[in-house]
Amino acid sequence: MRPTRLTSALVALGALAATFAIRSAPASAHHSFAAEFDGSKPITLKGIVMQIDWTNPHVWFYITVRDEDGKAMRWAFEMGAPHQLQQRGWLRDTMKVGDVVTVAGSLARDGSKRANARTVTTADGKTLGAASSGDSTTRQ
């Protein structure tokens, strides 16, 4: 059975639509620093690393911090992409679950316990840049 022009056109249109959908998905999933974080609200926290998600487009890690009353709070920190961190001296195992770290960054605009990390200082005193999307020297 020979395909008609209409069938061929519909197949081509479907392929084109699929191409646009695939190409636009990562762009819509990404955000600007200013949309989620407030550079005028710096924060520095020290806590124990509980989880690390070394994935694109951003590495996220989670620490448990104790407040003034001793209550444990879980904070989430966004860093740059894995390749950006590697350019700054990070390896996948630079920070491990159970490590105590000090993180400097910018608070989330929505008031949640999330922040964009600017630097991370490890227990041995080594400070590494976090390839923050709020840092004008960071290449996206």
Image (cartoon, rainbow, N blue to C red):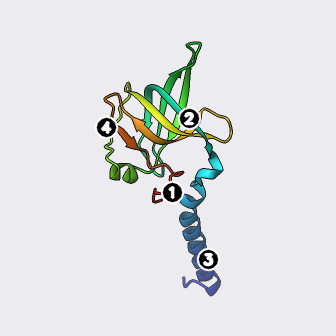
Residue count near mark 3 (Cα–Cα under 10 Å), binned few <14, some 14–19, many ≥20: few
Number of marks drawn: 4
Q: CA distance from mark 4 to mark 2?
A: 24 Å
Labels 1 and 3: the sequence-earlier one: 3
Q: Give the residue at mark 1.
A: 136
Give coordinates of residue 38: x percent, y percent. Answer: 63, 45
Q: Identify the residue at image location x=57%, y=83%.
A: 3
Mark seen at residue 43: 2
Q: CA distance from mark 2 to mark 3?
A: 50 Å
Q: Kindly report which numbered mark, 1 or 3, lies closer to the viewer in this rendering.
A: 1
Q: Give the residue at mark 4.
A: 93
Q: Say whether marks 1 and 3 touch (CB < 8 Å).
A: no
Q: Secondary structure at mark 2?
A: strand
- Vertical placement of residue 68 versus 54, above or below: above
Labels 1 and 4: the sequence-earlier one: 4
Q: Give the residue at mark 3.
A: 13
Q: Kindly report which numbered mark, 3 or 4, lies closer to the viewer in this rendering.
A: 4
Labels 2 and 3: the sequence-earlier one: 3
Quadrant of residue 101 in the image? Answer: top left
Labels 4 and 2: the sequence-earlier one: 2
Q: Kindly report which numbered mark, 4 or 2, lies closer to the viewer in this rendering.
A: 2
Residue count near mark 4 (Cα–Cα under 10 Å), binned few <14, some 14–19, many ≥20: few
